[in-house]
Amino acid sequence: MTAALNHISVVVVDDDADTLRLLTLVLQRAGATVMAADSAEQAFKRVCVTPPDVLLTDIEMPGEDGYELLDRVRRLADVRARRLPAIAFTAHGSPADAECAARAGFTLHNPKPIRPSLLVARVAALAHTAKPMHECFA
């Protein structure tokens, strides 16, 4: 893969260790700085400490799910958090699931599994679209 994601930071959250490792590896090989999290709580902390360009999260996780995580991020005082591009990465790929993710504020809905090249292209597109909006977290 090319360095399509140079200077792009991504918080990736999935409770499945193998999936988390795979997503991290794919994005790092494309040049991204990846902050991996195995829970929504850990991902939220990463977003608050080091704001990413894109959030990539599983939906179904024990405890707090991806919908709840995104809701917490969107409620942060900072405008950047409210605009953070977010990708729902889920095993549920029906049109109703995609609609639910869109209503929850996700920018994209990607059913598992996804081709690595498509994932990289989507993360790059979202990150480059959002770059002008970047402001420091309060």
Image (cartoon, rainbow, N blue to C red):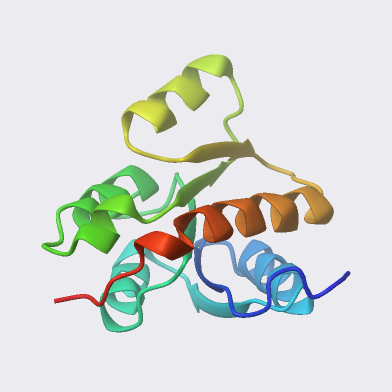
Residue 38 appears left or right of 111: left
Q: Residue 42 location in percent, x, y?
A: 34, 74
Q: Residue 109 location in percent, x, y?
A: 55, 36
Q: Residue 40 location in percent, x, y?
A: 35, 62
- Is residue 73 visible from the viewing direction of this image? no
Where is 133 relative to 106, above or below? Answer: below
Residue at 17% over, 64% down: 78
Q: Nearer the viewer, residue 74 or 19?
A: 74
Residue that protrudes farthest toward the front in the picture = 132
Residue 80 appears left or right of 112: left
Quadrant housing residue 7: bottom right
Residue at 41% over, 40% down: 106
Q: How many marks?
A: 0
Quarter holding the C terminus is bottom left
Residue 105 appears left or right of 115: left
Residue at 25% over, 52% down: 82
Quadrant housing residue 4: bottom right
Q: Residue 28 location in percent, x, y?
A: 71, 78
Quarter holding the N terminus is bottom right
- Is residue 86 visible from the viewing direction of this image? yes
Residue 116 appears left or right of 53: right
Q: Nearer the viewer, residue 108 or 113?
A: 108
Residue that protrudes farthest toward the right in the picture = 1
Where is 23 relative to 138, above or below? Answer: above
Quadrant housing residue 64: bottom left
Where is 75 relative to 103, above or below? Answer: below
Residue at 81% over, 48% down: 115
